[in-house]
């Protein structure tokens, strides 16, 4: 079965990112959901397990390959009155929705249900995968690699105790002076706001909000694509199960349908040829869309919870020392000095606090605790001396190595 996903494997690199700029809920959108949709796209275009997507049975008046091609690229249909479990149980019809339609065929007033979506399923699934990746790309554009520029080169800073840089294979352990200069640059950037603008956290929250809106949009678009039947898919399955002879999946994704081919006879009159078509593709389609119904619901709930958590953090980041200790303990192993936590929380607004939180997720615990302590001291001095920026300028003149990162 893994052969089906070889094309996905060639084009998708499954490895964790070095730098964390979002949370678990955000990653569910562009990693899990996008990958699920790509896998579904490959599956519905594969013939390894379902064979031909459609095979039609008709009289000898039309070649089978012509009938198969015609019925696949035009809409097949089911007869509404034959979507009846009682008639199926009584053996009046062979399959749900397949039976006599009337003397005029499809031109009669008999209600029929046309099915044309199956041609577009792979294109729609692939487009949805791209759309779920869009908010991630938008956030990366807004973020502009700010975190990466600040923490790059600090992977081994926790063991940087020597006077000289040490290279082991492809890894480099910086000198202690270089590490101190790097941490000083991060503090300077944080306090001056040259790398950290007030829009950083705002843009992140906007993208998280867009994720919620996007899930709702995808539910609406999928429901429109399936002619308004997607929204009821989950509730019908939950309430009625799949034990009925004619369940909701037989109505939305019929396995056997009808098709009518018209051609001219020897005398020039129009002849109608009815066919019964086996829709092998719908064996896969129904599983995919049932899974998507439940997954979209779960994804929307998780995205809403993530937004509510952001709101809670906005309220508590200045009001609760315990909240700050828990948050930074989960992102950065090791205990922070409670007094430093209190000072940081008092001086930082939510945008700075959120950036600092993500900074902690991308740094070694020991290194971040050193940064946290020095930053708390800098903030104290900044309150006492608003000319802190001038102080950094003077330090830069005395220490040219400590100049700002480019």
Image (cartoon, helix red, strand yellow):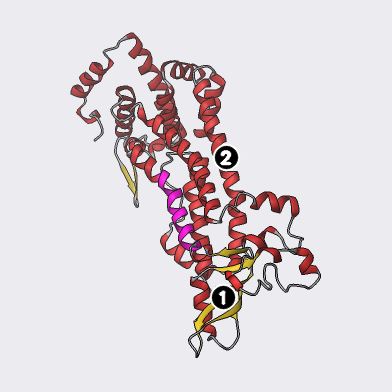
Main secondary structure of the magenta stretch: helix
In reply to whether residue 366 is colored magenta, the answer given is no
Judge whether residue 152 can be spotted in this image.
Answer: no
Residue sitting farthest toward the bottom: 266
- The residues bearing labels 2 and 1 have C-alpha atoms spaced at a distance of 46 Å
| Element on which disc 1 rests | strand
Label at residue 260: 1
| Element on which disc 2 rests | helix
Horizontal arrangement in the rendering, residue 37 relative to residue 282 (left or right): left
Other-residue count near label 2 (Cα within 10 Å), few / some / many at <14 / 14–19 / ≥20: some
Q: Which residue is mark 2?
A: 302
Q: Position of residue 146 (x, y in %)?
A: 33, 36
Q: Where is residue 178, by image quadrant?
A: top left
Q: Is residue 153 above or below residue 49?
A: above
- Kindly identify the residue that appears in the image at 49 percent across and 77 percent down: 69
Q: What's the magenta region?
A: 121-136
Q: Position of residue 171 (x, y in %)?
A: 35, 48
| Front position in the image: 250 or 160 | 250
């Amino acid at each position: 079965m893994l052969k089906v996903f070889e094309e996905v494997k060639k084009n998708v690199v499954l490895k964790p990112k070095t730098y964390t700029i979002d949370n678990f809920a955000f990653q569910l959108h562009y990693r899990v959901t996008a990958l699920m949709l790509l896998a579904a796209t490959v599956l519905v275009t594969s013939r390894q397990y379902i064979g031909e997507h459609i095979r039609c049975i008709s009289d000898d008046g039309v070649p089978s390959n012509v009938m198969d091609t015609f019925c696949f690229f035009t809409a097949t249909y089911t007869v509404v009155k034959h979507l009846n479990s009682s008639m199926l149980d009584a053996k009046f019809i062979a399959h749900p929705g397949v039976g006599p339609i009337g003397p005029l065929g499809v031109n009669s007033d008999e209600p029929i249900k046309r099915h044309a979506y199956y041609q577009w399923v792979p294109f729609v699934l692939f487009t949805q995968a791209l759309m779920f990746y869009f908010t991630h790309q938008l956030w990366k554009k807004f973020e502009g690699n700010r975190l990466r520029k600040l923490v790059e080169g600090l992977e081994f800073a926790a063991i940087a105790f020597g006077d000289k840089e040490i290279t082991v294979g492809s890894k480099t352990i910086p000198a202690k002076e270089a590490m101190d200069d790097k941490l000083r640059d991060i503090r300077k950037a944080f306090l001056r706001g040259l790398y950290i603008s007030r829009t950083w956290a705002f843009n992140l929250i906007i993208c998280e909000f867009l994720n919620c809106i996007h899930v709702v949009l995808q539910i609406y678009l999928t429901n429109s694509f399936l002619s308004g039947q997607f929204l009821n898919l989950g509730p019908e399955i939950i309430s009625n199960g799949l034990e009925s002879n004619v369940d909701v999946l037989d109505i939305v994704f019929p396995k056997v349908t009808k098709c009518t081919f018209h051609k001219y006879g020897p005398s020039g009159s129009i002849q109608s040829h009815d066919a019964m078509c086996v829709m092998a593709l719908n064996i896969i389609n129904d599983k995919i869309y049932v899974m998507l119904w439940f997954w979209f619901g779960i994804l929307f709930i998780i995205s809403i919870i993530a937004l509510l958590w952001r709101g809670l953090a906005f309220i508590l980041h200045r009001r609760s020392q315990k909240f700050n200790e828990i948050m930074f303990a989960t992102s950065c192993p090791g205990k922070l000095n409670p007094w430093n936590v209190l000072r940081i929380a008092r001086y930082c607004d939510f945008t700075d606090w959120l950036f600092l939180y993500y900074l902690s997720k991308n740094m070694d615990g020991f290194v971040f605790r050193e940064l946290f302590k020095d930053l708390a001291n800098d903030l104290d001095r900044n309150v006492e001396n608003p000319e802190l920026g001038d102080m950094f300028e003077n330090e830069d003149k005395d220490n040219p190595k400590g100049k700002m990162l480019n």
